[in-house]
Image (spheres, rainbow, N blue to C red):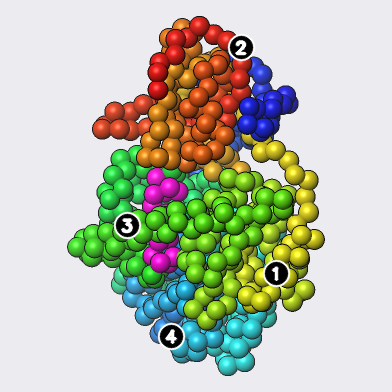
Amino acid sequence: MDSIKSLLGNVWNIKTRENVDESNVVDVLLKNRGFSRNFMESTMRNTMPDPYSFIDMEKAVERIYEAIKKKQPIAILGDYDVDGISSTCIFLKFFRKIGVDCVYTIPNRMDEGYGLNISNIEKYRSHLIIAVDCGSSSVEELNYAQENNIDIIVIDHHTMNSVPEGAIAIVNPHRPDEKDEFKYLCATGLVFMCTVGLNRLLKQKEFYKNIDVPQLMDYLDLVALATVCDVVALKGLNRAFVINGLQIIRMKKNIGIRELLSLCNKSEINVEAIAFFIGPILNAGGRLKTADIGVRLLTTNDLSEAQSLALELYNLNKKRQEIEASMLEESVLKIEENLNYICVFNPDWHVGVIGIVAGRLKEKYNKPTIVICCDKNGVGKASCRSIEGVDISKIVKRGISANVISSGGGHAMAAGFSIAVENISLLHEFLKTEIQYDSKPKTFDVDAIVNLSDLSFDFLKKVEELSPFGQENPSPIFVISDVRIICSRILKDQHVSVMLSDDFGNKLKGISFRCMGTALGDALLNSRDRLKILGELFISVWKDKRSLTLLVRDMVESDECSIPVLPI
């Protein structure tokens, strides 16, 4: 693998030097990712395991069946992000379809925080409680339930070091005693697997004599939403979930999703539409108000209600964007550049937005980032985003052991915690010791160098045979050689649009988002040299006109060329 250092100090790892065009791009991409041709056959039939292959899944299914048989009401306790909302909605749709008494609750992010709480457990003590996308680390709450004879099933995917004893069943691919094969599933994927197992048992028990059997494939739109928005690996079963889920979304069976797509004016229904439009809008309810709005939207069959709820979420997301911009601007001023991490604090920042700001700062500075605010009780609430090589969840756990952090958890790349405000200065000293890594330039794994003349809609169509793209199957990155920027302009004070051209008059649109004020933005606006441009291809749509476009990530200066330069 060859490496190039870019104009901006980044490193490009060139995976192949062979000429790539429409005829061989699929083979090159498969080779670069270490996939065989079987990757292209990620169907539900080929990838679905038996639900009971997961530890405790059979226990969970049998206990749910017992509740159904005895007419015990069921309570779903979810989380406030898209994964938690979608998990809740699948169970609601399934139980309502078969006539089971089912309620749900999702904690308020601002007032209750993440996960199970004793208040909700007590409220639903007469129910069978199913915790989705939470519960794996709720040791105290599960012990309380066990001591009070309250049955709880946990279906979750968050990291676990040990298995709490207070639950009837804990289905989690990250159990230390679970095999590794399906660790990449999100909670909604596991909930879907649970409904598959439950549906099978209900058929065996002849439950469906007088009612219609639920069409479980219709729930894959919700599985696709969660799988994309929770940024889990898009391989194997997840790839099948998303491919089939996108087909269900395109059929517009869920009127809530349909209304969101209409508000976003999205004609292309793909992973990008979910990740950058639908997901943030659904998350806005939990961030600024209540995730209940999203649950109601995704489960309603009333068009008027769907339109009203979709508009409410859309407007909440616009408000979230305004809050985010203000917080981001203030955060940048607080950064101590000499540290190898970022930790910024303002008691008045919005707890529902600190995670997004942490993500933005991490992307901009390529450092582990922690953003802290205070809840209404004056307790510090932190959201963390990390980089490759720094497992932020392990650092949080060590902080808890050191009595610096009160409580918390998460994944290697994202976590959250609570902290006493008076401990924040102590936290800095702790982080200086704990966050140790070799500072490296940002790297891009380049699939191939291509000529502008080889790029077309047909080329991109071949590339998209490997879609959906995401975690562990990233959108292919290409370097386009020997081009110049012949014109450029600023869009909405944040983005830079360019037109690229080669010596033969071939042209390609390019855009870099949120790059104003960065080295990349300055280079795009001012460079007039021959360049190698790095980025990802996509189709942009403006006034029903489709254009092949490059999402520009980086550039390298090359030799001079004779392309005429247009004034900005």
Q: Is disc 4 placed on a helix, strand or loop?
A: loop
CA distance separating discs 4 and 2: 74 Å
Which residue is pictured at 32% across the width and 57% down the height? 314
In the drawing, does residue 143 fall left or right of residue 220? Answer: right
Compared with 220, 560 (above or below) is above
Q: Are marks 4 and 3 in contact (CB under 8 Å)?
A: no
Q: Position of residue 281 (x, y in %)?
A: 38, 56
Residue beneath label 3, please? 314
In the image, farthest residue toward the bottom: 148
In the image, farthest residue toward the front: 333
Compared with 472, 352 (above or below) is below
Task: Determine the main secondary structure of the stretch shown in magenta.
Answer: helix
Q: Earlier in the sequence, mark 3 or mark 2?
A: 3
Q: Position of residue 310 (x, y in %)?
A: 29, 59
Residue interval drawn in magenta: 273-288
Classify the position of the N terminus by image quarter. Answer: top right
CA distance separating discs 1 and 4: 50 Å
Q: Residues within 10 Å of mark 4 (few under 14, many from 20)?
A: some
Disc number for residue 237: none
Disc number for residue 425: 1
Identify the amino acid type marked 2. Asp
